[in-house]
Image: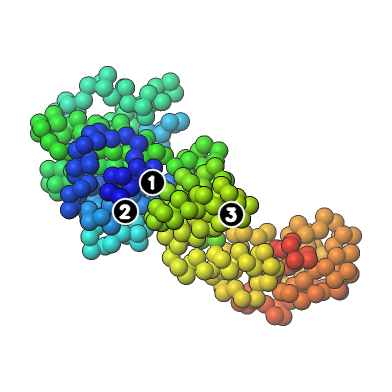
Amino acid sequence: MKLYDELIFRDLIKDVSDVEKVKELLNENSIRFYCGFDPTGKSLTVGHLVQIVRMKLLQNYGHTPVVLIGGGTGLIGDPRQTSERQLLKLEESLENANLIKKQISRFLDESKTLYVNNYDWIKDINMITFLRDYGKNFNINYMLSKENVQSRLETGISYTEFSYMIIQALDFLHLYQTMDVKMQFGGSDQWGNITSGLELIRKTLGENDAVGLTSPLLLKSDGQKFGKSESGAIWLDEELTSPYEVYQYFFNTSDSDISKYLRTLTLLDSNEILSLEEQAKLEPEKRVAQRRLAEEVTKFIHGEAALKEALLVTESLFTGDFQNLNQKAFKTLEKVLETREVELDSSLISVIQELKLASSNREAREFISNGAILLNSEKVYDVNYKINNTNLLFDKYIIVQRGKRRTGLLIVK
């Protein structure tokens, strides 16, 4: 399968500026292409993973990714559909840029990847130069026709965000002239900015071989983007979204989304993807495709060790046996289970209610008396039991269970 055909198979192409030229460039031994990431947060999300997977795929075919971190454009803000972005301070933008560069570097071959920050050239452009050399090339009607601007006309858009497309266009021109970058890609919401870049290159240099393409946006089952500003974002930073949470999210993928996610978020062989899709149709109850997707995405983002930890946590929550977990896994449990910090000598009856394992003192006493309450796998029958530091896990944790299926976590101060 040729690269362009594989991109089509993986649903990684939506808009293309010139199909034949793109095919020709992708069939060369090596070209430089770029994708931009604005540092509006300290971490990327799963929504960005589509572009990262595409960069990795092109790199596997011998092409060179130029990763643009938008330290400059991040100070302006790409127009959202709903409202103005909160402006970042310069220090925040540059700090976030370093964090995102480090994050992306985990996925690509560092010896064959170039990194640039557009703050390095944008900061040197004065207002007169910006208006005469760049702004003069953009017709207001042309800018108003762009989808990301159109969506904001009713609620209002500042000149700052309105000018964003000019600055991104300037980036493409700069990289085309100074680094021989021939291709830009992004999500479909970036199509207006990408075509603005192509237009600026054409007006500045005349005939050229620059091209642009986009991929469909990755959407959650409710139709929302996986963006930083959306609720319930799935972050690539494990401190924000644990490997276990990533695994669980994709293991619970609906049958209607499984094909899309397998193709866009993994680099599994096409034959394996087709086989998994067939299994999902014939035996959906076995969730073979969902399990494979969850394993592959978790491993791609966080590595083999993190996947093993996520599987151990999953198994522990299913079986009720937490004895084989390491301390890092307990940090995950803090986010997953109902968790409370307690003082020594706290009443077990009150603790059970705080963990929502009982609805009243009477019910809590009954559970204890009947041997239904376990502390670190040991049954407790004493209704007057006080929390103590005997047999703590990692010197601070107590797993509180009501039977094998209802579980809470105590952190003993």
- Asked whether the beta carbons under mark 1 and mark 2 sit within 8 Å of each other, the answer is yes
Mark toward the start of the polypeptide (2 vs 3): 2
Direction from residue 28 to residue 391 in the image, left or right: right
Residue 253: numbered disc:
none
Colour pattern: rainbow
Whether residue 46 is situated above or below residue 216 in the rendered picture: below
Give the amino acid type for the residue marked by disc 3 in the picture.
Arg
Image spot of residue 252 (x, y percent): 58, 51
Q: Secondary structure at mark 1?
A: loop
Direction from residue 207 to residue 58 in the image, left or right: right
Residue 287: numbered disc:
3
Give the amino acid type for the residue marked by disc 2 in the picture.
Leu
Of the residues tagged 1 and 2, which is closer to the observer? 1
Residue 10: numbered disc:
1
Give the amino acid type for the residue marked by disc 1 in the picture.
Arg
The residue indicated by pointer 2 is 57
Residue appearing at x 22%, y 56% in the figure: 62
